[in-house]
Image: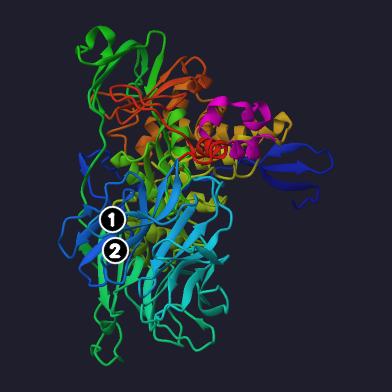
Amino acid sequence: MPNNKEIVVWSEGKIKRIDTESTQVADVPFQVNNTFKIAEAHSSNSKVYTENFNPKVIRHAVTSPDGKTLVFNAVGYLWKKNLPDGNPQRITKSEEFEFEPSFSPDGNRLVYVTWKDDAMGAVRTVDLNGRNSKKLTSEKGIYRNPEFSRDGSMIVFNKESGNNDMGNTFSKNPGIYLMKASGENIRKILDEGEFPMFTKDSKRIFYQTGGYLMGNLTKRLKSVDLQGKDERTHLESKYGGRLVPSPDNNWIAFSNLHKAYIAPLVMTGKLVTLGPDVKTVPVTQIAKDAGINLHWSGNSQNVHWTLGDEYFTNKVSERFTFLENSVDSIPPITESGTKIGLELKTDVPSGRIAFTNARIITMNEKEEVIENGSILVEENKIVSIGPASEVNIPKNAKIYDLKGKTIMPGMVDAHAHIGAFRYGLTPKKHWPFYVNLAYGVTTSHDPSALSETVFGMAELIKSGEMVGPRLYSTGIILYGAEGDFKAEINSLEDARSALRRTKAFGATSVKSYNQPRREQRQQVMQAAKELDMNVVPEGGSTFFHNMNMIVDGHTGIEHNIPIAPVYKDIFTLWGNSNSGYTPTLIVNYGGINGEYYFYDKTRVWENEKLLTFTPRSVIDARSRHRTTLPEEEYEEGPILVSKTAKALSDVGVKVNMGAHGQLQGLGAHWELWLIQMGGMSNMEALKTATINPADYIGLSEEIGSLEEGKLADLLVLDKNPLEDIRNTNTIIYTMVNGRLYDANTMNELGNEPKERGNFFWENRRNMEIFPWHE
């Protein structure tokens, strides 16, 4: 101040003057009257249940050498389609999952890999008509990407190291292997590399390094001889995805930042750098939005790819003007392809199940609690709910008398990373699914995952081939920072293209993350409105990003805003918007993560139920060596942020439970309890785990509350969570889509009882004791 005795600071939402001599503090009264124009928060609704569905995740697609047949993986198995208009048909009747097929040179036979949880993986061959199936490998392992040599006499393949989804036993000596097509003389030739294939003369092996999406920033195409010697690096591509040489080795198809291109394959002995804008070789774009499953025709004249449930083909001669048979001008990029046309029934149980004499927390608009009520479920829907005296129970219903128990809707985790970042094979029993269901999460929304993996598993669940929560996702995020999966958004058309890419796989939402400029985020918003998709952004702990996301009408904010508490300006802004809030207190910005509270206060590594469904290595690594903190660290960290969430809720902001996948299953309860610790009533807290997130991700017309006509996703609790919020962790039964499970074993009950079977760590234990057992 001019008197040189006082200084002015901002604190506690006010301007204050401090006398530097007396240290007395006084408020400087002020008021700012301002008007903001804010966009209406965008919200898109999606249909949850349909009797039939068309799988959109077409993986590992390959075209026969004669161009007449497409073979691909969908919902766990191999299918064939006569091109262009045939109906897809299963090739085998096997119950093993089938992946990554490749044609023999004559087109009559396929080599592919399989996975069965209790027997692990194998390399197999089968005739295209499904006959003469043969297992070529005898050693257990995780096998990948088999390919025939040009004369059909040899097969090259990968053996993969272990992972937390499929286990780490029987995973020694990963690398690239060769064998005769009969399965004899298996030998390892290389420690590194993926996607192996033979050169045109079958004297060398091409392979790729750097992984796939979410791999290294730069991918390289290399080759070695059949002894694994004489390594050569032919080309590299920054931001590359797949690098696929043509059979005649004259061309290379490659993906780069999701788009697909072709270029001449120049092998002069010098390293060639490849990308969309290089000048050393001619490069042409073939896919407008994205292309996966890049592969070539047998004569190298056509390149094929897929996106979602569409199959595309381009002639090389129509993508360049300098070839003998080239066109005079290059036609527009292909925008539409051939529909795959696979249609499957959605899994639905049979019969009726009745729950009687229970307390029912409905979560309907009236927040009705029925103290002695009954629910009748037919197949996968609630057909009657109300006081026990008013619900008619048919004689053919399987009845569960739940006197003294409580029923509530299944929990909806709005921010659930559920183990879908890895590109690879899918086990039948994905343990994160089971542990989430065991702890009552019946719907998961994953706001960052590998699109092929997460939507592939969502369709496996929908078809009944896997057990898990209803699964929704953004797929690959629209990442603005560095990475081989980043999305460059510099125009509205860029944003449209990026959203079309994920919507093709089944995305109903998109996550805008680290797009640094506001107009980029606004372009994503506009594209999302046009394509009817929700936008669930993350501000990356950047407060002003969060605020202009609200102003610009984003569906909500993921992760907590990094400032707490907040004051009238934020309450006024956010309270007048319909943007939701998923604070993920379990991974708190600006303070200690909320999960540490529970590692500190409880002995997680002794939780028998959790260990039933989760590998001990995962639990021990997170919980045994725990950090103990003074109580004020929690009070000034996640609990303060929770109090802010409560205050925002009081002015109309809908708060959602999102557990971030920090600890699958139990973490959802931790997040719910942290939300309640900020001052919400138990009923308010339960809304954040049920109807609020169901509404946030656009599904509340069919799930999120217990009402007649809605889908049967519900939990049976031993104790009442309205009396003590931690009673949410007393689940006896979980019902999802009408299927009823024992929450302590995940054995199916109801009208179609079925034992769960073993997880990989249980299977491996048996294998180690009885190595001959399969």
Q: Position of residue 349 (x, y in %)?
A: 26, 29
Query: Which residue matches tag 2?
Result: 109
Amino acid type of disc 1?
Answer: Asn
Q: Are marks 1 and 2 in contact (CB under 8 Å)?
A: yes
Return the residue nearer the eye: 677 or 100: 100
Residue 398, image quadrant? top left
Is 747 inside the magenta-drawn segment? no
Provide residue 522's location: percent of width, then percent of height: 40, 59
Q: Which residue is mark 1?
A: 132
Q: Could you tell me if residue 475 is visible in this image?
A: no
**Label 2 amino acid?**
Arg
- Residue sitting nearer the eye, 356 or 757: 757
Q: Secondary structure at mark 1?
A: loop
Magenta-drawn stretch, dominant element (helix, strand or loop): helix
Of mark 1 and mark 2, the one earlier in the sequence is 2
Which class describes the residues within 10 Å of circle 2: few (<14), some (14-19), or many (20+)?
A: many
Q: What's the residue at 78%, 37% (across, down)?
A: 24
Tell me if residue 301 can be seen.
yes
**Vertically, is 337 above or below 526?**
below
> Circle 2 — which element?
strand
Q: Residue at x 48, y 53 (%)?
A: 142
> Which quadrant of the figure has residue 644?
top right
Q: Residue at x 57, y 39 (%)?
A: 768
| Disc 1 packing (10 Å; few <14; some 14–19; many ≥20) | few
Which region shows up in magenta?
A: 598-624
Expressed as whole percent of the image width and height from the top left, the position of residue 568 reads 53, 38
Q: Is residue 469 rendered to the left or right of residue 169?
A: left
Q: Nearer the viewer, residue 410 or 74?
A: 74
Q: CA distance from mark 1 to mark 2?
A: 9 Å
